[in-house]
Image (tube, rainbow, N blue to C red):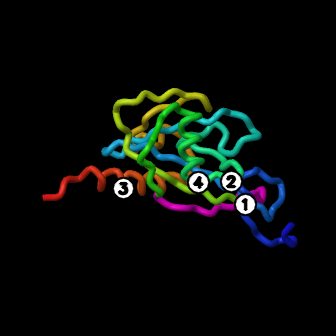
Amino acid sequence: MPEKGEHTSYDGIHSQHQFMVDRVAAIWIMRPDGTALLQHRDDKPEIRHAGLWVPPGGHADPGETMLECARRELREETEYEASDLQLLMTLDRTYDDGVAYQASIFWCLYDEVQTTVCHEGQELVFVKRSEATNHPMPTFLLDVWDAAAVAAKATTEVSP
């Protein structure tokens, strides 16, 4: 057990202790025009970002890599199988309640073939970036969305 105030990673098991860091993955499924697949979170006060729009994702299981976590969460929440997930960034956030997260942010291009099914939250829809104001979300996610859109566009641009 770490000393009080010492930070350590704790294999993604949610902890009430301030020194633990939850490992989570978020997955941005993108279209080349910047449209993203978003999940409308359940409106339950006990969950983080209740009632807001976020990309699919969740907590890592013990011993699971973040890529494995991302693939599993995406499959469980949407039935989408993404073989080409790419790490976009890693964010460290500590919320007002003292819970700290290390979020691995992944992205991939939507294959336009598979359907998505909402197994978690209220709804799962593709949202145009220009319509983000109609979908309340944590403000820090707007910058992440923009970064994922840049990556998606760069991947689909053809070099002369």
Q: Which residue is mark 2?
A: 63
State whether residue 130 appears in this view. Answer: no
Mark 3 or 1, nearer chain start: 1
Comparing 96 with 154, the one in front is: 154
Residue range (magenta): 88-99
Whether residue 76 is in magenta: the answer is: no
Q: Identity of the amino acid at label 2?
A: Gly
Between marks 2 and 1, how big is the CA–CA gap? 15 Å
The secondary element bearing badge 4 is classed as helix
Q: Residues within 10 Å of mark 2 (few under 14, many from 20)?
A: few
| Picture residue at 83% right of the left edge, 54% below the top | 16
Q: Which residue is mark 1?
A: 21
Kindly give the residue lying farthest to the left in the view shown. 160
| Picture residue at 19% right of the left edge, 53% below the top | 158
Left or right side of 94 for 139: left
Q: Which residue is mark 4?
A: 66
State whether residue 32 appears in this view. Answer: yes
Asked if the residues shown at circle 4 and circle 3 are in contact, with their CB atoms under 8 angstroms apart, the answer is no
Q: Identity of the amino acid at label 1?
A: Val
Between marks 4 and 1, how big is the CA–CA gap? 14 Å
| Picture residue at 57% right of the left edge, 48% below the top | 68
Q: Identity of the amino acid at label 3?
A: Ala
Between marks 3 and 1, how big is the CA–CA gap? 28 Å
Mark 4 or 1, nearer chain start: 1
Between marks 4 and 3, how big is the CA–CA gap? 19 Å
